[in-house]
Amino acid sequence: MILACSNISKSFDSKVILDNCSFHAEDREKVAIVGINGAGKSTLFKIITGELKPDDGIVTVAKNKTLAYLSQHPDVAGEHTIYEEMLDVKKDIIEMESTIRSLEAEMKTTEGKELEKLLESYSKLTHTFELNDGYAYKSEITGVLKGLGFAEEDFDRKISTLSGGQKTRVFLSKILLSKPDIILLDEPTNHLDLNSIAWLEGFLSNYKGAVIIISHDRYFLDKIVTKVVEIENTKCTTYNGNYSDYATKKASLREAELKKYLNQQQEIKHQKEVIEKLKSFNREKSIKRAESREKQLNKIEVVEKPKYIDDEMHLKLTPRITSGKDVLSVENLSKSFGDNHLFSDINFEIKRGEKVSIIGNNGTGKTTILKIINGIIDADSGSTKLGSKVEIGYYDQEHHVLTMENTLFEEISDAYPDMTNTEIRNVLAAFLFTGDDVFKQIKDLSGGERGRVSLAKLMLSNANFLILDEPTNHLDITSKEILENAINSYEGTILYVSHDRYFINKTAGRIIELTNNKIVNYIGNYDYYLEKKAELTAIYAAPEITETKDTSSVSSSKADWQTMKDEQAKLRKKQNELKKTEERINELEEKNNALSEEMNNPDIASDVGKLMEITKEIEAVNSELEKLYELWETLV
């Protein structure tokens, strides 16, 4: 055991955050800390690092073990370049290397016993240097920086010129290079693109120390962790397995708790009915029996009704107007900002009912496409065309649709003046705003709270085409799951940008990837995208070999798009045919069983004519089945 938290308790202003929480981490173990926003996850991390003192309980770290902590707002500053900041992590190795070079120089001019002493020191030092990967520290620095999304031309940039997200990546790089025995990571995937997240997954999965992670990225947790510690209602519960294992076990426990509550409520109701009946007889014996039952009923330890956040927040996104079949057509779209060329001559269409996710690395132009469709910015060339009766509902990262001076209540009532006070309160309660929360001003809300208000307004709109830019940002896991359920049950059309791979996997029926200034279309979820990425990227978005512009690039782009459309149409047709074939096979198998049972009927056994009729029917069924099996094998 490398770290243990024993009976940790913490309160702020008499509000209990953690109550008697215990868990431990083994050497090399990967642990997730999960819970809704405000559950106490970051508080627990600060207690582990010593930044906060617990009111009760102790944190034990194994002797001589080192610990490093990445917070959501790390402190990294100064006039160092990014590369110099990394070299600072390796200063012991660099000093060792310098000493080795000095010894080498000294040995050239030394003889006899002094040389033997120098050789002995040199041998010990080079051995230590090698054990600490001294010969590879420069390539190690380069590998980590590139893995976390820095290009080589960024290495000489000064820390003081970086954005907050870039500084976070620098700090994370320093932690990974320092190789502590225990790493605490609070939302490490924030500010990382998909490639960097995938790299970090591989790095942490193979890391030789213990890693404890707070993250809302469920796909990330699924790939890495082997244990989940949940903080719920101030208590800690440990589940073995990854996030999906935890979610399954948690759902089973909730179901069992609810069943226990409902069974007891049913029994209480039954006993009360019996008591009332006995009293209604109005006889001494029946009244005594009723009183006896009442005493037993009062002794029952009543099971509280299980209360979960997701019971309180149910989105129902139902468009009042149905759009035409063709919702959006994008043709030959191009956009650059100065010398920064985002994409050229991209083409795609969206049909009614589709749930489409746009993905790609940071800076490829995903949000730009959404803004062009919404008319917020203009394309350099090309066009976007909405279909018949299409009404857009737009959710953006900056929440521009909110009035900062409004209270939550005013924000809803101003947008929907026909709603009653009760209706407004009910809608806000569905998004976790209850009591006096509704009178908070928008400007005083956190990013996640503003996101929930924007989603509430979107739910009430008449939109049938939702365009969402990073809708899961700042949402906790429970809120994400509720949004997933709402999107999956939504009868309109959705186009969204997201870095949340678990969310994409759960909701997208199609993925459009922006890569190498082009798009690649995938008919499937995120797992399907990963399976086909290398193959389809090579076909439709291979990097340009030269900078010479092909004069036929526009027509080539159209041809590529048309080819992709044709291939995806063929794939959909094949999938539909496979489904119909399997349904027909099941239908005929059932018919065959029924005919066989009919033949075994004693009443029919003596009817030769009927037996011949059934036999012919069975032969016909088997003949069709044989053909269907052959067809099925070509379709799978």
Image (cartoon, rainbow, N blue to C red):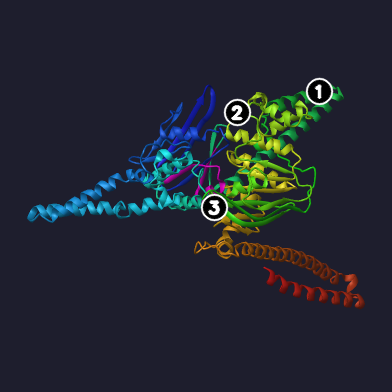
Write down the quadrant of residue 629 in the picture. bottom right
Q: Can you tell which mark lies on residue 341?
A: 3
Q: Which tag, 3 or 1, sits closer to the chain's start?
A: 1
Q: Which tag, 1 or 2, sits closer to the chain's start?
A: 1
Decide: is 70 above or below 574.
above
Decide: is 282 above or below 620.
above
10 Å neighbourhood of mark 2: few (<14), some, or many (≥20)?
some
Q: What residue is at 54 percent from the left and 52 percent from the top?
A: 341
Q: Nearer the viewer, residue 84 or 319?
A: 84
Instruction: Read off the residue under disc 2.
Output: 443
> Mark 2: which secondary structure?
helix
Q: What residue is at 60 percent from the left and 40 percent from the top?
A: 397
Q: Nearer the viewer, residue 331 or 234?
A: 331
10 Å neighbourhood of mark 3: few (<14), some, or many (≥20)?
some
CB under 8 Å between callouts 1 and 2? no
How far apart are the two marked residues, 3 and 1, measured between alpha carbons?
Answer: 87 Å
In the rendered structure, the answer to whether residue 72 lies left or right of residue 296 reads: left
- Location of residue 617 in the rendering, given as x and y in whole percent from the top left corner: 85, 74
Which image quadrant: the C terminus?
bottom right
Which image quadrant: the N terminus?
top left
Amino acid on which disc 1 is placed: Ile
| Residue 1 seen in this snapshot | no
> Mark 1: which secondary structure?
helix
Amino acid on which disc 2 is placed: Lys
Nearer mark to the viewer, of 3 and 1: 3
- Location of residue 63 in the rendering, given as x and y in whole percent from the top left corner: 34, 39
Which residues, given as a range, are shown in magenta?
210-230
Amino acid on which disc 3 is placed: His
Instruction: Read off the residue under disc 1.
Output: 287
Q: What residue is at 60 percent from the left and 65 percent from the top?
A: 552
| Residue 155 seen in this snapshot | yes
